[in-house]
Amino acid sequence: MEFTYGDTIRILSNIYVVLGRIAYCEDDGEESDSDTDSYKTISPKEADWFEYLLVSNATNEEYWLSCDKHHNGYALYRMCEKRSTDMYRLLEAGTEKAISVWGNVDVDIGDSAEYKEFITETGAIYAVEKWSDETEYAEGMYLATADVTIEKDVLRSNAIQKRMARRRILQGILCIPLVIWALLILMAITGTSWHTVRAYLGHPYTINEYMSEDAPLFTYVTSITGNDGEKSTIYQSPYATVGETIRTIINAMEGRNLTTYQHEINEDNAVALLTPYEYCLIYEDTEHRILVRDESRQFAYAGTDDSGYYATPGVHRFYRNFYWSFGYEFDKKRYTSPSFYDTYQGVPLVDDPVNMYYQNYASSVRSGSAGSRLSSGGGTSVGK
C-alpha cells in the first residue's frame, strides 16, 4: 500500500498523519561517483522500499513506517539513542540510496547511507543508518499488513495542522523567485513594462505613486483630510497648461483603465480623470497655477465639506458632478459607509466628443503599447 501527503492512517490503535516519504533502492556498489546523478532519473516505482514520515495525531511524535515492496511487509520505527547489540542478531545490512523524496524530510535524491538491522528473539528491531554527516539509530517492530489501514474523516491535531500550514507557506515562498524569473523573461521577450505586469497582478501603478516618487518636477503643496481619514493630495504641475499636465499623466499611466472628461467654460479650465482606484482633478486655480488633486475613490465617495483647494466655483462643481456621474453609482456597491453623494443633486455629465478629447488621447497611448500588453480583459471601463 502506498500513501500520499496528509493521509491519516491507523496503525494498531493509534492514528498518524503522513508528512513525508523517501523512496530507496539497494545500492549494489557498482555505480561510480560520476553516476550519482543517475539516481535522479529513476522512477519511484523502481524503489525497493519506502519510508514514510509519520506524526502521531495524539502526541505529535515522529515515527517512520517502512514498507517493503517485495515482501509486502511493514515496520514501524522511532528514533532512539545508540545501544549495545549484544542481545540482538544481525538481520540484514547494505547500502541504501534515496531515489525520490517529498514532504518534510531532510534527505535529498542521491543521498546514501550504510544500514544495519538487528532483531531480538522477541521480534524487537534495532536499526543503524550511517550517513555522510551523522549516524542515526532507531527502534521498532514488524507489523502485519492488517495492522495498517487508511482512516477517512479524521480531524488532525492543531499541531499537525500548523505544521502542514508552515510547509504550504514555505512552498509559496520558494516559488516566488521562479515567478519573478518568469515575469522578467516575459517582459524581455514581449517588451512588457513593469507597470503592465503590476496591473495584471491586481496591483496597478497609481497616479499618486507617479506624483510622489517618479515625477520630481511635480511639487507637493498640501493634503486635505477627509471625513473617513483618507487624504486628498495637492501637487503643483511644472507645466504651463492643464493640457500638458494631463497628457503627461496619461502617458505615465500608459493610457490604461482611465475615464477622462474635459471641462472648459469661460475662465474654468479642468480635466477629471478616474481610474479603478483613484480620482484625479487637474485644474487651473484662482492664482493661475496648474494643480493636480489626487485622492482615492473612497475619499471621493465619502466627500468633504471643502470648497476645492483654490478652485473656482465652476471647477469645484465640475469636480463634484464628474464623480457623481461616473464613479458614485459603482462605488456605493463597493463602500458601505454613508456618502456625501447620497443626497447630492448635480448635473449629469454625458459623453461628448469635445469633452472626451483626452479619453481618445488615452486610447491612442494605450494602442501604442498594445503589442506589449498582458491580456487582462482590455477596455477602459472603471465602473461607470
Image (spheres, rainbow, N blue to C red):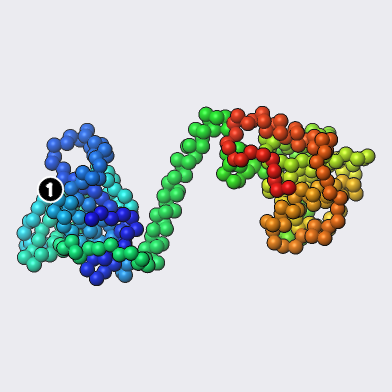
Residue underneath mark 1: 94
Nearest the eye: 218 or 112: 112
Q: Is residue 252 visible?
A: no
Image location of residue 99, percent across then percent down = 24, 44
Residue 334 visible to an observer of this rendering: yes
Q: Report the side of 249 relative to 101 (left or right).
A: right
Residue at the (13%, 53%) spot, across then down = 71
Q: For the point 48% across and 41% down, which residue is it?
A: 179
> Residue 35, how many percent across, how many down?
21, 34
Residue 363 % position (x, y)? 71, 33
Q: Is residue 298 above or below residue 11?
A: above
Closest to the observer: 101 or 239?
Answer: 101
Instruction: Examine the rendered structure and indicate whether residue 40 appears above or below residue 131.
Output: above
Number of numbered discs visible in the structure rendering:
1
Image-based side of 345 in relation to 88, left or right: right
With 191 as the anchor, is 249 left or right in this view? right
Q: Secondary structure at mark 1?
A: strand
Answer left or right for 180 relative to 382.
left
x, y percent for residue 246: 77, 37
Front residue of 132/95: it is 95
Residue 256: name its quadrant.
Answer: top right
Question: Three-letter amino acid code at disc 1?
Answer: Gly
Q: Residues within 10 Å of mark 1 (few under 14, many from 20)?
A: some
Please tell me in which quadrant of the rendered image residue 371 appears. top right
Vertical placement of 327 versus 43: above or below? below
Residue toward you, 17 or 224: 17
